Image (tube, rainbow, N blue to C red):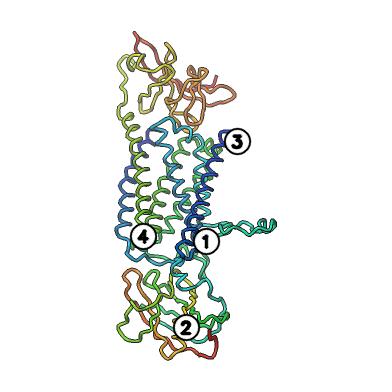
């Protein structure tokens, strides 16, 4: 049975998050265009407002994509970034929307300004996107022109970089339309996460789009330096956070003949927190609450977030990503929620924590 | 399941960590000193004054120009606004050189000195192109020495092909 669609349930936190996001993007776009026009006027250089808008939206989407892709590894490295993580999907959708406007442009009516006797500002309330601006001067349909005009696939300098942008935007589109929890629930978290890993393919295509496009026509060393810095930043934090994760996976525990695994003294686990270990190929979060210990799967059922990095609130583990809760004893979410995670046998033996197999099937109480 | 996904993530990031820096550095190192022109190049458009070109000009002369096996049909038109001349070029196929530039030169000697030539615009993309001709070119077209059009490879600035222009009637469109 499929899950029904429930519209986004806005909370104060989400509204603040999205408000800051929208305000920041708008401020960037307005500043980019205003400074470009001011600079051109000062240097007495003619400037096309459409071209400036295309660059403003393109660079905004590119920067925002870097920020969006940075949140995941940063949250792995420092829990402070969980604040940004909980609504990261809205940021991803914003990347697609801004990227789409870069391609398509938009047309807002200018009449409202004239109603108040005001002249419409010079900023592009209406501008042609990159598709029309660069492909609509001929007698071919812009889309046909986009896919057929440049066939220098074997030439690095003249490569049709626009097509790489098409690939990147297509990936972002898939990410955006499947970002809602409706798809997450129906596809299941593992499938959904696997699909969304394609964002790295999209990112690679967009780096190519920028390198073979903007970096070829704009010879400024600053632009090249910024593109390189963004790339190294993103790759570095992914590799650093990845190494930490891979180091954990690289030391799986072996089950002793007694059927238990010794995890060391209970004092090694901070009260109210968890120790994450790898057992039978998956991660287990062993929580301590005073003199008691509990073991649950480390994988949240919502988005597979790391439960072992969560805190204990009212007898429940709270996932640090989106706040999903699971009871320590049973692994079941408190009613009316129905999510469950497997639990593991765990005991205290002479002051040491011992973990057992097999896991208990998740069940709602 | 999730550990296999972490493994896939590890491979993906490792590949990108090699591939993407190589691509960026290669793109920067190999880019030409003179960037390939595009249809949206503001510099070329402003030089060609394209934004003021009339959609409907009055035909003054026509020419057919074969460059690297591709035929370009063109015509010189009198601007209906009386601001001189405009040039319309129709490439009948895709040129072998991407984004070639169109220059005008007053010289009629060979070899052509491209350094003395003036940019008219870019023949980037497909379809017809319309260029507002600078006053210097407009005056030359009305004289006995109308000069030549040059098709230039933007990568190495080499002249691909030249076309000797014919004078246009002087009775109309005096600025």
Which numbered mark, 1 or 3, is in the foreground of this view? 1
C-alpha separation, residue under disc 4 versus residue under disc 1: 21 Å
From the image, tell me which residue sits under label 2. Answer: B138
- Pick whichever of labels 4 and 1 is earlier in the sequence: 1
Q: Tell me if mark 2 has few (under 14), some (14-19) or many (20+) residues whose alpha carbon lies within 10 angstroms of its own.
A: many
Contact between marks 2 and 3 (CB within 8 A): the answer is: no
The mark that comes first in sequence, 4 or 3, is 3
Disc 3 packing (10 Å; few <14; some 14–19; many ≥20): few
Instruction: Check whether the beta carbons of the residues at disc 4 and disc 3 lie within 8 A of each other.
Output: no
Q: Nearer the viewer, residue B115 or B96?
A: B115
> Residue B30 bears which disc, if any?
none
User: Dot 3 corresponds to which residue?
Assistant: A10
Q: Bin the neighbour count of mark 4 within 10 Å (Cα to Cα): few under 14, some 14-19, many 20 and up.
A: some
Of pointers 1 and 3, the one earlier in the residue sequence = 3
**Chain of residue at mark 3:** A
Q: How many marks?
A: 4
In the image, which disc is placed on residue A219? 4
């Amino acid at each position: 049975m499929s899950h029904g669609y429930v519209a986004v349930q806005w909370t104060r936190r989400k509204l603040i998050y999205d408000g800051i996001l929208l305000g920041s993007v708008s401020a960037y776009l307005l500043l980019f265009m205003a400074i470009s026009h001011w600079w051109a006027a000062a240097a007495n250089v003619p400037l096309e407002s459409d071209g400036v808008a295309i660059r403003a939206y393109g660079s905004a989407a590119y920067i925002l994509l870097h920020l969006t892709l940075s949140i995941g590894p940063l949250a792995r490295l420092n829990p402070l970034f969980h604040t940004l993580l909980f609504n990261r999907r809205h940021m991803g959708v914003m990347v697609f929307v801004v990227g789409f406007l870069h391609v398509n442009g938009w047309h807002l009516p200018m009449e409202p300004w004239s109603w108040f006797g005001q002249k419409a500002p010079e900023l592009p309330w209406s501008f042609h996107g990159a598709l029309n601006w660069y492909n609509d001067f001929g007698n071919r349909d812009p889309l046909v022109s986009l896919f057929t005009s440049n066939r220098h696939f074997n030439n690095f300098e003249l490569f049709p970089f626009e097509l790489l942008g098409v690939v990147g935007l297509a990936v972002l589109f898939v990410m955006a339309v499947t970002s809602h929890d409706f798809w997450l629930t129906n596809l299941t978290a593992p499938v959904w996460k696997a699909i969304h890993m394609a964002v790295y393919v999209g990112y690679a295509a967009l780096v190519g789009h920028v390198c073979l496009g903007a970096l070829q026509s704009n010879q400024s060393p600053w632009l090249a330096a910024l593109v390189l810095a963004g790339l190294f930043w993103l790759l570095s934090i992914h590799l650093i956070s990845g190494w930490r994760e891979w180091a954990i996976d690289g030391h799986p525990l072996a089950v002793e003949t007694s059927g238990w695994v010794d995890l060391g003294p209970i004092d090694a686990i901070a009260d109210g927190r968890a120790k994450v270990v790898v057992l039978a190929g998956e991660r287990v979060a062993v929580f301590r609450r005073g003199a008691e210990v509990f073991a649950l799967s480390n994988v949240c059922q919502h988005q597979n977030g790391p439960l072992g990095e969560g805190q204990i609130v009212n007898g429940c583990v709270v996932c640090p990503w989106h706040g999903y809760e699971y009871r320590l004893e049973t692994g079941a979410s408190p009613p009316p929620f129905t999510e469950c995670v497997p639990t593991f046998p765990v005991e205290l033996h002479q002051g040491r924590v011992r973990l057992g197999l097999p896991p208990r099937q998740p069940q709602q109480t | 399941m999730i550990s296999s996904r972490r493994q896939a993530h590890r491979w993906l990031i490792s590949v990108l960590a090699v591939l993407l820096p190589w691509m960026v550095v290669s793109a920067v190192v190999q880019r030409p000193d003179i960037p390939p022109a595009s249809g949206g190049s503001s510099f070329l458009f402003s030089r060609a004054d394209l934004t003021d070109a009339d959609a409907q000009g009055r035909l003054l002369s026509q020419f057919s120009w074969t460059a690297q096996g591709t035929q370009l049909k063109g015509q010189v038109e009198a601007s209906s606004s009386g601001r001189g001349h405009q040039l319309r070029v129709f490439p009948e196929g895709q040129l072998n050189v991407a984004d070639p530039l169109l220059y005008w030169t007053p010289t009629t000697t060979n070899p052509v000195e491209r350094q003395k030539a003036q940019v008219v615009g870019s023949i980037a993309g497909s379809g017809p192109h319309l260029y507002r001709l600078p006053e210097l070119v407009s005056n030359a077209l009305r004289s006995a020495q109308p000069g030549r059009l040059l098709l230039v490879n933007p990568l190495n600035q080499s002249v691909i092909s030249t076309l000797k222009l014919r004078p246009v009637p002087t009775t109309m469109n005096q600025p």
